[in-house]
Amino acid sequence: MNKKLKTVLQYLSLIILTVSLLWLSLRGLQVGEGENKADFLWQAWQKSKKSYLILMAVTVMISHVIRAERWRMLLNPTGNHITFVGSFLSLLTGYLVNLAVPRGGEVSRCYNLYQLEKTPVEVSFGTVVVERIIDVICLVTLIAISFIVEWTKLKAFIDSLNIPTQSGSPSVSPWTILVVLGIIGFVAAIYLLRKNKKLKKIIDGFKEGLLAVFRLKNKALFIFYSISIWLLYFIMSYFVLKAFAETEQLGLSAVVTLFAIGSIAMAAPLPGGAGSYHTLVPLGLVMLYNLPQADAIAFVFIFHGWQTFIQILGGVVSLIISYLIIRWKSRQQK
């Protein structure tokens, strides 16, 4: 199959899956007689406490500032001393691309940084891989802590997702699926690394970026930045719960639980986690905290929509500023 066609079909399938999950989520939104679903969501938005949503937006931007500074710090040992502005603009541009192309933001932010700072893409991409490894470690650690703190509720939620194989057949446990997928993914990664020469060449190309973390002058500060980013994500979840009358009384234990469920949902390779987040999180709110299904769905749609709006706004502004800077530098060189 043609490589370009294969890529198009892959993204098309992701879009179809996203739309299907969003449709399934909205289908469960039951509203009163004479009221449509759009009006119900709009009323939920109007009743939300905007002060907490603004605090959430501020928290998100602070996390982006720290992440941009961490990336700049990670690139220094490679001999590429980039500006904070270049790092920040490229990061937000990458988030914007991620909304359209799952995982495409990593490459686009490196290319944007090259346009701004002339940093080799393969080197900056190597540091992005390091960032992703660190983020996965932080995420797994926080999810593990969440399961320890709220083990009973989270275990009940996971167990409730049993998937029936056929009518009358025993269900398949999600725990089994997770283990099997993990083993398959590991074996596939080893196979690709050993057989794909092109992939080997790419890995060798950004080796310097990968090893940059071991040459950091201030490793303690790097660790502090990494922990701070994820703590800010946690605080962001708390602000969102406080923004709605239906969820403000749930408490910190609910933040822990929903953070774990939401993190798992956002890990799905879908544009901005759309679909998977709208399916799993409302289910958790209904099952674990007895929240009415309509309120749970409205909460998630507004939360995710507001977060997406912040990413779009920040990304578009960053893209415009990047373009103006690149154009100005191009004129200066003539």
Image: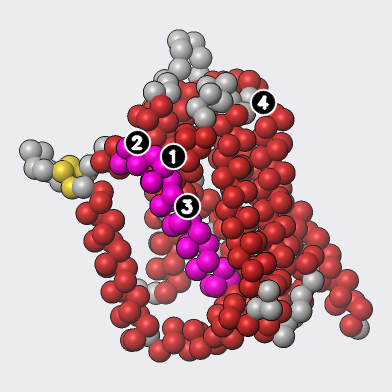
Q: Nearer the viewer, residue 316 or 59?
A: 59
Could you say which disc has been placed on residue 153 in the image? 2
Q: Quadrant of the N terminus?
A: bottom left
Query: Where residue 271 sits in the image (x, y, percent)?
Result: 51, 52
Q: What element carries label 4?
A: loop
Q: Which amino acid does label 4 sit on?
A: Lys
Q: Is mark 1 on a helix, strand or loop?
A: helix
Seen in the picture, residue 130 relative to 270 is either above or below; the reply is: below
Could you say which disc has been placed on residue 142 in the image? 3
- Name the residue: 90% across, 76% down: 331
Label 1–label 4 contact, CB within 8 A = no
Label 2–label 1 contact, CB within 8 A = yes
- Name the residue: 74% across, 62% down: 89
From mark 4 to mark 2, how far is it between C-alphas? 28 Å
- Name the residue: 58% across, 81% down: 214
Identify the magenta region. Answer: 128-155
Seen in the picture, residue 303 relative to 332 is either above or below; the reply is: above
Q: Which colour scheme is used?
A: secondary structure
